Image (cartoon, rainbow, N blue to C red):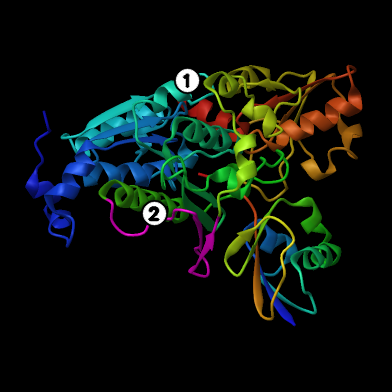
Amino acid sequence: MKKEISYERYQRQMILPGFGEEAQQRLSDARVLVIGAGGLGCPALQYLTAAGVGTIGMADGDMVSLSNLHRQVLFHTSDIGKNKAEVAAAHLQQLNPEISIMSIPENVNNQNLLQLLTGFDIVIDGTDNFATRYMINDACVLMNKILVYGAVSRFEGQVSVFNYPLKQEERSSNYRDLFPEPPKEDEVLNCADAGVIGVLPGIIGTMQASETIKLITGQGNPLVNQLLTFNAMTNQFFTMKVAAKKETVSLIPDTAAAFQATDYAWLCGASFQVSEIDAHTFDGLIGQHHIDVVDVREPDEIPLVSEFQHLRIPLTQIATASEQLKSDTVVVFCQSGKRSRQAAKLLSEQFGTTKSIHSLQGGILAWKTFCQTK
Amino acid sequence: MKTDILLFGQLAEQVGAKQISLEGFSDSETLIKALQQQYPVLSQSKYIVAINQEIISGNTALSDNSIVALLPPFSGG
C-alpha cells in the first residue's frame, strides 16, 4: 500500500513545472542511506527529510561533541555525548513524521556494509576519512548502488555522482576513476587537523541532497561522469569530466568475500603498529609522575591545554627533539589522533623497546568530550 | 605557447598561489616535471590532473592557452 502524501507539506515543490504528484511519489518510494551524520550528512539529511524521501537510513557510531556544532547544525548543545545517528533520527522525525527513519548507531565496516546497502537505492557519502570513502565506493560498485559523493577541506569542496547506471551493464565513473589508490595517512590532513569553515560542508552536503533529489525524480542533469569543485573564498565553481576507465575494475573487490577480506584502513596507510589509548585510559594516566605527555600540534593550535602538565614538541620536530623525553612511558596527543599516530611511530622507531610509546586515540578533542560527559 | 595552471585545495597553500602561467610546454608530462622542479612540495603531494576541464590519466598534448588543473583528494566531512 502506498503511503499517503501530504499535499500541503510538499505544496511548494509539487507546483514546480515537471514535478507534481509523480515526482513526489518517487521521493516517497525512494530509500536513501546517509553514511556519516556529520558536517555533510546533517544538511543532506535535513533536506531529504523535508523533501519527503520515504525511507532514510543513517549510520554513524560517533558521539556529538562540542567542536562538531559549528558545522553539524542538526545537533543541539544538549545532544553532546549522545550517538549522532540516534539524535539525528529523533530530530528528523520531528521535522517530518510521515517518513520512515532508520538510525544505525554504528560505523560502517567491511563486515556490515554490504548487508546494510541491500535496503537502499542511493547512498550519500558524508564520511571524513579515506579508508571509509574507498570502502563505500567499492561496496556501491559491487552492489550496483548509486553513490552521491561529497568531501571538503578548509574552504573547498567536491561533489560528484558515482556509479550511475547508463546502459545495460555499463555504469558511470566512480571514486577510483578519479583517485585510483588511497593516499597515505600523512599525505592529506583531515578536518580536525586542517580545519574547515562551518558553512562549507553545509553547502556541499546540501548539494549532495540536491543531486539525490534530481536522481530520484529524474530531473535536471546530475553530476554523472563529472566532478564539481567549489571554493567558498572565491565563489568559483569548476566542473571537470571524469571518464570511467577499464583498469579501475581490477582495483575493486569483485565478490562479497573479497570485499570483506579487504583491509581498507591498511590500504590507506593507517595500520602501522602504534599503541593507541582511549580518552578514558588517558584520563587515568595524566598527572602520574613517570609519564611524559606531549602535545605534537603546532604552537598556535587551539584548544589550548591547561588542565595537565605536558611538553610541546610539534610533529615536525619530534624526531630531533626526543632528548626532551625522560620517562619510560610517553603519551603523545594532537587534535584528532592522526598526527600523534605518526609521532608515536617515529618515536617507536627511535626508541625501540626502551620506551613504551602511546598515542591518544581521537586526540585532545576526544579527551575534552570525555571530560564533558564523565 | 602559454599554459595556465590552477591549483586546488592544499596545493594552492603549499605552492603559495592559486594560479601560475608558464610558457613553452607542449605536453602534460614535461609540464608537471617542470612544476615539480620549481615547487618540490608537488612531488610529495597526491593530486590528479585535468586539462581543459577533462581529467587525464596518461601524458596528454597541450594546445595554446590550455588550462591545467591540479586537484588533490579531500577527505573531510
Q: CA distance from mark 1 to mark 2?
A: 27 Å
Residue at mark 1: chain: A
Residue at mark 2: chain: A
Query: Are there few (<14), some (14-19), or many (20+) residues within 10 Å of tag 2?
Result: many
Magenta stretch bounds: A218-242
* Residue type marked 2: Met
Q: Position of residue A290 (x, y in %)?
A: 80, 18
Badge 1 marks a residue whose secondary structure is loop
Q: Position of residue A261 (x, y in %)?
A: 61, 19
Q: Is residue A42 above or below residue A199?
A: above
Reply yes or no: does residue A224 show up in magenta.
yes
Q: Position of residue A248 (x, y in %)?
A: 62, 42
**Residue situated in front as seen by the camera: B36 or A334:** B36
Q: Which residue is mark 1?
A: A112
Q: Which residue is mark 2?
A: A207
For residue B67, which quarter of the picture?
bottom right
| Residue displayed at 50% across by 31% down | A142
| Residue displayed at 15% across by 48% down | A22
Q: Are marks 1 and 2 on the same chain?
A: yes
